[in-house]
Image (tube, rainbow, N blue to C red):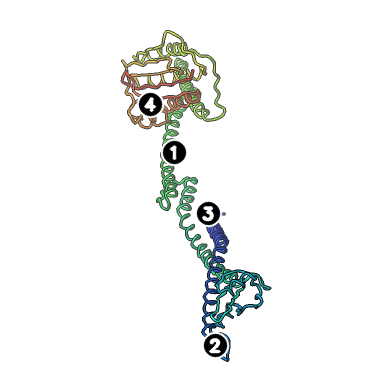
């Protein structure tokens, strides 16, 4: 059931309930008003009847009352009685009412005749005796029912008018929702040239604005993914081209015997580079999946950093880059996966070494900060701008931003560091270092 049908049915149901409740609530009020009006009319007719009799007025052909007054009494189903001392009480009139009427008092009372409950009005006559008028309660009920029927008819007419108005309002209200649905379907099918004009109520207009923001975010995200895939493809193609070229040269026998060992070493180095890149990509993909495994044990981050520093001092030396280790005198023990932590350190160190010019410095620091073990890599290279810091761990963003400007990698390393930090229950952040370059800090829960 769509929202238009639901709205129309709801409007009709509300109107129908309103009609029913109004009818139920109005009936006793209308009946009470009809009774009061009937009592007032009966009282007025009683006065007129007593006055006509006292004045000796007669109708046509010697009737007791004038024709118009008599017709009025008959139309209202009113029965009149003239009583004197010694007269029996008319049907429905109690003896007490009869006594009061004959004593010269005007009486308004109720009684029960053969046909049912009646209204009673008595008026004294100047010549002695009294006139008594009776009107059945059924007349009051008929008048009340007529009034209720008229009210119900008016409410029913309102219901009939409410249904088309509800349909029109529902169509108008759902028009921007249908536009939002169509836009969402277009976005799901791959279209990114979708823009909605906010219209309708505030809540509906907010949906259009949210879809516009979602479309912009998808355009940005897909652009980053596209650039990331292009950069990764380029990085994969470079070692593959080298491996393929050298393999064909070896196969064709064009490599001199004395260069075979050197060629084999080059092929092995390019294969190792390729293997590491593929491994990083797999790790990055698995970090968001259920098969990403962490094997936590008690790890001293100081020992881990010292082992890594030995390797990276040897790597930094030939590049004329000073590699410095900053560790406390005591152990910094955390419960984590040492292989993953070493992966974090190696990626950060390699990233720092890539951008560090000769004569610069790289610092690997370990420390305890409350419930966290901290691993930090700082350098004195070109550093990061304020715009770089929020996107430093987004795949391929810095790679695309600085490609051709400074030495860049695949855009995978920092993204892998950010995901690994989250996978280990910690966090990663970027900033500027005291040495003038970039600072990357990873916190691991102790």
Q: Tell me, yes or no, whether the two marked residues, 4 and 2, touch with CB atoms within 8 Å.
A: no
Q: Callout 4 environment at 10 Å: few (<14), some (14 to 19), or many (20+)?
A: some
Q: Callout 1 environment at 10 Å: few (<14), some (14 to 19), or many (20+)?
A: few
Residue 281, how many percent across, how many down?
49, 28
Q: Is residue 63 left or right of residue 333?
A: right
N-terminal-most mark, 2 or 3? 3
Q: Tell me, yes or no, whether the two marked residues, 1 and 3, touch with CB atoms within 8 Å.
A: no
Q: Quadrant of the N terminus?
A: bottom right
Between circles 4 and 3, the one closer to the viewer is 3
N-terminal-most mark, 2 or 1? 2
The numbered mark at residue 58 is 2
Element under disc 4: loop
Q: Is residue 379 left or right of residue 54?
A: left
Q: Tell me, yes or no, whether the two marked residues, 2 and 3, touch with CB atoms within 8 Å.
A: no
Q: Is residue 436 left or right of residue 253?
A: left
Residue 253, how many percent across, how many down?
49, 22
Which residue position holds label 4? 408
Element under disc 1: helix
Q: Relative to 251, say whether 220 is above or below.
A: below
The residue closer to the viewer here, 138 or 112, is 112
The numbered mark at residue 222 is 1
The residue closer to the viewer here, 403 or 421, is 421
Between circles 1 and 3, the one closer to the viewer is 3
Between circles 4 and 2, the one closer to the viewer is 2
């Amino acid at each position: 059931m769509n929202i238009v049908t639901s709205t129309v049915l709801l409007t009709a149901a509300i109107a129908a309930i309103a009609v029913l409740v109004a009818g139920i609530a109005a009936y006793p009020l209308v009946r009470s008003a009809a009774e009061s009006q009937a009592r007032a009319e009966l009282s007025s007719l009683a006065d007129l009847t007593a006055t006509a009799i006292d004045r000796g007025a007669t109708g046509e052909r010697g009737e007791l009352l004038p024709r118009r007054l008599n017709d009025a009494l008959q139309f209202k189903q009113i029965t009149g009685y003239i009583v004197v001392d010694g007269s029996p009480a008319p049907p429905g009139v109690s003896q007490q009412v009869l006594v009061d009427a004959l004593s010269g008092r005007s009486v308004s009372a109720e009684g029960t005749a053969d046909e049912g409950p009646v209204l009673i009005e008595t008026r004294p006559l100047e010549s002695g005796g009294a006139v008594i008028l009776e009107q059945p309660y059924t007349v009051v009920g008929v008048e009340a029912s007529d009034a209720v029927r008229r009210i119900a008819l008016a409410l029913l007419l309102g219901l009939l008018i409410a249904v088309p108005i509800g349909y029109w309002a529902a169509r108008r209200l759902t028009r921007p929702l249908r536009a939002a649905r169509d836009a969402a379907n277009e976005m799901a099918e791959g279209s990114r040239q979708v823009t909605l004009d906010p219209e309708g109520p505030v809540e509906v207009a907010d949906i259009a604005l949210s879809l516009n923001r979602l479309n912009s975010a998808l355009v940005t995200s897909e652009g980053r993914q596209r650039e990331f895939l292009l950069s990764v493809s380029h990085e994969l193609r470079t070692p593959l081209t080298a491996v393929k070229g050298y393999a064909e040269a070896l196969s064709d026998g064009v490599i001199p015997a004395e260069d075979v060992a050197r060629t084999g070493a080059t092929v092995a180095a390019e294969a190792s580079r390729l293997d590491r890149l593929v491994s990083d990509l797999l790790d990055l993909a698995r970090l968001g999946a259920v098969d990403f495994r962490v094997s936590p044990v008690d790890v001293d981050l100081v020992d881990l950093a010292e082992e890594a520093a030995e390797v990276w001092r040897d790597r930094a030396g030939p590049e004329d880059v000073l590699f410095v280790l900053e560790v406390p005198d005591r152990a910094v023990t955390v419960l984590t996966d040492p292989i993953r932590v070493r992966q974090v350190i190696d990626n950060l160190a390699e990233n720092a070494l890539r951008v560090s010019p000769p004569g610069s410095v790289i610092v690997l620091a370990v420390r305890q900060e409350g419930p966290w073990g901290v691993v930090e890599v700082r350098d004195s290279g070109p550093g990061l701008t304020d715009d770089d810091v929020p996107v430093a761990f987004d795949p391929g963003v810095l790679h695309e931003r600085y490609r051709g400007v400074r030495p860049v990698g695949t855009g995978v390393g920092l993204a892998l560091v950010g995901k690994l930090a989250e996978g280990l229950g910690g966090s990663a952040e970027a900033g500027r270092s005291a040495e003038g370059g970039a600072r990357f800090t990873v916190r691991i829960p102790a």
